[in-house]
């Protein structure tokens, strides 16, 4: 369903499935968010750099992937379907009037149109490929617009909720490359881990939730560099958990 997600074909033998929730800033023509077009270029609308990075990493690892094809301002696929913030009204100081005007029936229709097909297909891919490990790619802004005093110094972060098996393997590997790595930073997976809670923790399946600072992958060269850096870490982490 190109209206909701794109798929990257891959080999089950990779032992991996990639899920990328925030890879697009696309807003369907029939949805009016009531925002200035410039907002769609910001981190509140899309994880900057993740579209390109996801394709490169999946290619390096020859793994299947499901990649969101809508903006997180249409539906935030990295929220539970019954979480009000799945159709955000405010994000980092930006008001989303088109979402504020949704009544409950319209909000539920938005969830049915986008959230359920996306996560339903993710579940089908996992059942089909039976991976040894899931992984997800996100990016974060170096500084929130609503917290200008609070800079985020990490090059990357590894997030987790209850299952930290993959995190405990990957963090020291990234640090050995000289990177400043956030351990459940820039925010905690114990508070926000919706997609991996649903598709990994609920299955007892190991997962690696990777956040890359978006200024490091905002251009093609940065994405290429980080894909070459991350792909071996992901495969080594998978192998360590077998």
Image (tube, rainbow, N blue to C red):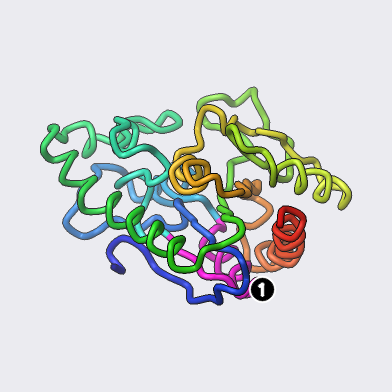
Residue position for label 1:
60
Give the position of the N terminus as an image quadrant: bottom left
- Residue 96 on the magenta span: no
Residue 6 spot, x, y in % from top left: 39, 68
Residue displayed at 55% across by 58% down: 50
Number of numbered markers: 1
Q: Residues within 10 Å of mark 1 (few under 14, many from 20)?
A: some
Residue 58 spot, x, y in % from top left: 59, 69
Seen from the viewer's position, the closer of residues 67 and 207 is 207
Image: 65 above or below 159: below
Residue displayed at 72% across by 34% down: 183
123 left or right of 61 in image = left
On the image, which quarter does residue 111 sit in? top left
On the image, which quarter does residue 233 sit in? bottom right
Residue displayed at 66% across by 73% down: 60
Image: 31 above or below 15: above
Give the position of the C terminus as an image quadrant: bottom right
> The magenta stretch spans which residues?
49-67
3 left or right of 218 in image = left
Residue 205 spot, x, y in % from top left: 56, 49
Dot 1 falls on a residue whose secondary structure is: helix
Seen from the viewer's position, the closer of residues 14 and 181 is 14
Q: Main secondary structure of the magenta part?
A: helix
87 left or right of 221 in image = left
Image: 231 above or below 146: below
Residue displayed at 39% across by 55% down: 25
Residue 123 spot, x, y in % from top left: 39, 57
- Residue 63 on the magenta span: yes
């Amino acid at each position: 369903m190109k209206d909701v997600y794109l798929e990257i074909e891959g080999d089950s033998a990779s032992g991996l499935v990639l899920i990328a929730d925030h890879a697009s800033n696309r807003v369907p023509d029939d949805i009016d968010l009531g925002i200035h077009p410039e907002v769609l270029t910001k981190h509140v609308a899309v994880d900057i750099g993740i579209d390109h990075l996801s394709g490169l990493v999946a290619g390096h690892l020859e793994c299947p992937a499901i990649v969101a094809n809508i903006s997180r301002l249409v539906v935030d696929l990295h929220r539970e379907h019954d979480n009000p913030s799945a159709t955000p009204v405010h994000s980092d100081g930006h008001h989303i009037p088109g979402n504020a005007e949704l009544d409950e029936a319209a909000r539920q229709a938005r969830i049915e149109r986008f959230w359920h097909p996306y996560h339903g297909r993710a579940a089908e891919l996992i059942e089909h490929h039976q991976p040894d490990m899931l992984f997800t790619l996100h990016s974060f802004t170096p500084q929130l617009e609503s917290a200008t005093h609070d800079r985020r110094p990490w090059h990357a972060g590894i997030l987790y909720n209850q299952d930290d098996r993959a995190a405990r393997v990957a963090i020291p590997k990234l640090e050995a490359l000289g990177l400043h790595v956030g351990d459940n930073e820039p925010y905690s997976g114990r508070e926000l881990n919706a997609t991996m809670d649903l598709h990994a923790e609920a299955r007892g399946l190991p997962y690696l939730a990777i956040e890359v600072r978006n200024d490091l992958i905002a251009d093609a060269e940065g994405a290429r560099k980080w894909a070459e850096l991350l792909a071996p870490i992901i495969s080594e982490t998978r192998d360590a958990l077998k």
